[in-house]
Image (cartoon, grey):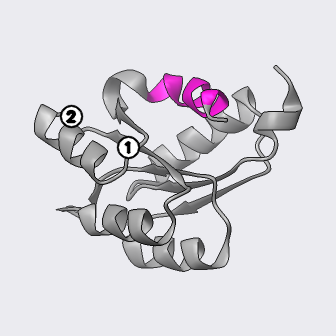
Amino acid sequence: MHETETSQKTILIIDSSLLIINRLMSLLKEKIPVTVIYSSTDTKQAVCQLQQINMDIVILDIQLAGKNDFELMKFMKKNYPGIRVIILSNLVSKYYQQLCKSLGAFMFMDKSKDFDLVPEVIISIK
């Protein structure tokens, strides 16, 4: 793996679980040399980070604080169309997958099955 491409990526992980965020950060740091990884546990904080930092990739759980956060996806699609959004969620029905794709998600991943595949997906993003 060449460090030149993956080291240029700035990633924001948005998940209400700090345990998931920490596991994902460890996995990413172990597998790929990213420039910087930010994290957020809620929509308000995520919006602030998006406004202040030029993100390349957002890893988003659509279920934040007990609600489905499709407004955040709409906000990102409208204001930051270049960000690649990877949905990593336990809400994996076809309905949610199609909705997320229609809102601009780059990829939809099952948190319980695909967690360890996230670094490969990020590496594949050019």
Mark 1 secondary-structure assignment = strand
Indicate the amino acid at tag 1: Ile
Q: What is the magenta range?
A: 115-124
Q: In this view, does 22 lie above or below 76?
A: above
Front-most of residues 94 and 111? 94
Q: In this view, does 11 lie to the left or right of 42?
A: right
Mark 2 secondary-structure assignment = loop
Q: In this view, does 20 lie to the left or right of 112?
A: right
The quadrant of the rendering that contains the N terminus is top right
Q: Name the residue beneath numbered marker 2.
A: 92
Residue 92 is a magenta residue: no
Q: Name the residue beneath numbered marker 1.
A: 87
Q: In this view, does 87 lie to the left or right of 39?
A: left
Please tell me in which quadrant of the rendered image residue 88 appears: top left
Q: Position of residue 35 (x, y in %)?
A: 80, 50
Seen at 38% across and 59% down, the residue is 16
**Residue 78 seen in the current view:** yes
The quadrant of the rendering that contains the C terminus is top right
Q: How crowded is mark 2: few (under 14 residues within 10 Å), some or many (20 or more)?
A: some
Q: Position of residue 57 (x, y in %)?
A: 58, 50
Indicate the amino acid at tag 2: Val
Seen at 54% across and 55% down, the residue is 83
Q: In this view, does 93 lie above or below 2?
A: below
Front-most of residues 37 and 54? 54
Mark 2 and mark 1 lie on one chain; the one further toward the N terminus is 1
Please tell me in which quadrant of the rendered image residue 107 appears: top left
Front-most of residues 14 and 95? 95
Q: Where is residue 66 in the image (x, y as percent from the top left)?
A: 20, 62
Q: In terms of secondary structure, what is the magenta stretch mainly? A: helix
Q: How crowded is mark 1: few (under 14 residues within 10 Å), some or many (20 or more)?
A: many
